[in-house]
Image (spheres, rainbow, N blue to C red):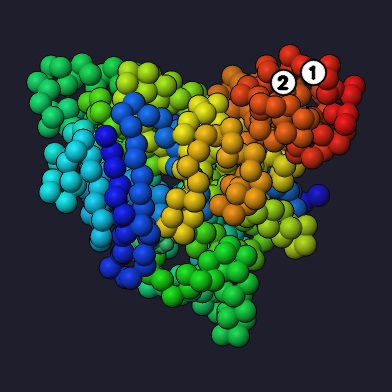
Amino acid sequence: MIEYKNVTFRHKSGTVALKEINLKIGEGELLAIVGTNGAGKTTLIRHLNGLLKPSSGNVYVFGIDTKKATVSTLSKRVGMVFQNSDHQLFSNTVEEEITFGLKNFGYDYVKAKERAETMMRFFGLTALKDRAPLTLSGGEKKRVCMAAVLAWEPEVLVLDEPTVGQDFINKKKLYQAIVETNAAGRTVIIVTHDVEFIWPLQPRILVMSSGRIVRDGRASDIFVDEGLLRSANLIMPQLAEISNRIGMAPAALDINQLLEVKDNWLRI
Amino acid sequence: MTAVIEFKDFSFIYEGEKEAAVKHISFSVEKGDILLIAGISGSGKSTILRAMNGLIPHMYNGVYEGEVLIEGKSVLDTPMNELSRSIGFVFQNPENQIFAFSVERDVAFGLENQGFSSEEIRERVAWATGMLGISDLRKMAPFELSDGQKQRTAIAGVLALKPNILILDEPTSLLDPLTAKETLALISDLNKELGLTCIIVEHRLELAAPIANKMLVISKGEVRNFGRLKDVIVDPVIYLSGISIPPLIELQKALGIDDVRLTIDSFIREIVHR
Ligand SMILES: Nc1ncnc2c1ncn2[C@@H]1O[C@H](COP(=O)(O)OP(=O)(O)OP(=O)(O)O)[C@@H](O)[C@H]1O
Ligand SMILES: Nc1ncnc2c1ncn2[C@@H]1O[C@H](COP(=O)(O)OP(=O)(O)OP(=O)(O)O)[C@@H](O)[C@H]1O
Ligand SMILES: [Mg+2]
Ligand SMILES: [Mg+2]
């Protein structure tokens, strides 16, 4: 459904941010992209809605060559939440920000307002609905961006560092939104440094380094490979590391799995 | 012990808002402390930091009550440029911080402002960019950087100043996991070597808790707990304040361990048999 064919991307300054990327992402997949700062993660996903076009090679989304499509037609199907909220927010109020995409993509006024209200309730934004988005706290801004994109239920949801600035409650909501979106058969792509967050999701993982995909595999295989982790500036999620150190395989996905076998490892 | 930072019944309402962003805040930080501030999104963490370096009240208008003292002097009566001599501040969004033509110029900016010799500047820029792993990016323009590279640049510029007080607002949010860990370890080293006092806001406690000695929990603009980190981090008020507990701490709480270990190494060494 999504395919990168021999994609190389060169910035105007000459930096080659993607080097001969070949990648297929199927419908309904849950994918996480991790790796060193500057590895090319943001550059990679910006090709999905045509914000960036390959310098050479092609990106196909739903069979459409992104070089032959406009950002606005692609954006309806590929919803993207940017790494830096300030680049996304432009409306005068939170409510307008969330209804904008809905109206743009054909919801009538009443439906858009209803849908926006549901999203604001879900992300705890109702009390902020008349505030100017740019005066919000960091985490609040991010939630507005998330609500705005999730509102129109794009077929592919792309999140660039969604957990930044999010506390426990909001991370849980985000987690739930990701699981539900994916369970509804939609593709979810998450770029993140938050290894604790993706560990229990057990997604397919792409590890990037210096413009290349250096590993494509399951979380359970990648997060035990110490050499790979070191080379891509990753660390083990705590549950994986504790499991590893007490000799428990496969690694625990929550603390209860560790507690169930505590007689095997607890000294006191 | 001398208080380096002291909040005395401080409250602040941003101009045009009805509700106070923070209310009746009182706590103090001593020389050499590393204070971790935790609280849910919108609880008032950044507001507290802005009241330390003088952005509040000098740049943000609003209703200011109570007092904030830095090294014994009221922030209200101290101009920002004077405060910035002892306080290094890393913003939540690095784009609000970096603006020079190149990474190197940006890291040097604060040093030039404070009148260091060119030799000293060269030395410190080399040290800070090396520490943050951005030496190779020295000649790049900020807009050409990835978000994490921007954050590394912002941190390097502030560390280069070796300030007495270092204030960091979610400094690792955009860093890759290993760099995040190493940056916090670096701050811990500077704290030990130079006695630097540090205030850090961080949602990912698994990263920041191991280096901090004190913790402040804030919820809806009010202080819910403040004290020794090891005591505060196991206080149930943390859950009520919506703060996420790292699996390592959660596990120890479930096992009924009072004196929680903050690193997996010490947990394995002291709690687990081999
Ligand atoms: N410039 C501003 N004008 C008006 N209200 C503001 C302004 N900045 C922050 N606020 C409000 O003050 C409250 C506290 O915000 P603050 O930025 O201190 O929160 P925070 O704890 O740092 O949150 P986050 O973790 O999301 O960054 C929030 O309700 C926020 O919307
Ligand atoms: N506008 C730009 N002009 C020139 N080079 C750029 C630009 N944006 C990014 N780069 C470079 O392209 C490379 C990839 O950047 P990208 O933003 O994709 O990294 P990333 O993996 O998302 O990193 P991070 O984890 O820090 O967000 C980096 O080396 C960066 O310096
Ligand atoms: Mg990025
Ligand atoms: Mg903040």
Name the quarter where the C terminus of chain B is drawn.
top right
Q: Which amino acid lies under the numbered mark 1 shown in the image of this protein? A: Lys
Q: Residue furthest top?
A: A260
Write the residue at 56% across / 85% down.
B118
Does A113 sit above or below residue B85? above
**Tag 2 subunit:** A
Ligand 1 closer than 8 Å to label 2 CB: no
Near mark 2 (Cα within 10 A), the count class, few <14, some 14-19 or many ≥20, is many
Judging from the image, what secondary structure is the residue with disc 1 in? helix
Which circle marks residue A258 in the picture?
Answer: 2
Disc 1 sits on a residue from what chain?
A
Q: Position of residue B60 (x, y in %)?
A: 40, 48
Q: Is residue B234 left or right of residue B92?
A: right
x and y, in percent, of residue B54 in the image: 50, 53
User: Element at badge 2?
Assistant: helix
Report the front residue among A251 and B37: A251
Q: Residue at x 31, y 64 (%)?
A: A10
Using the rendered image of the protein, determine whether residue B60 is visible from the camera's viewpoint.
yes
Name which quarter of the figure residue B230 lies in.
Answer: top right
Image: B46 above or below B192: above
Above or below residue B266? Residue B30 is: below
Label 1: few (<14), some or many (≥20) within 10 Å?
some
Q: Quadrant of residue A139?
A: top left
**Residue B224 visible in the snapshot:** no
Q: Is B16 on the left or on the right of A77, as rendered?
A: right
- Name the residue beneath numbered marker 1: A262
Callout 1–callout 2 Cβ contact below 8 Å: yes
Looking at the image, which residue is at 13% across and 16% down? A110
Residue at the spot 31% in from the left edge and 25% down from the top edge: A186
Instruction: Give above or below for A228 relative to A111.
Output: below
Kindly tell me whether mark 1's CB lies below 8 Å from ligand 1.
no
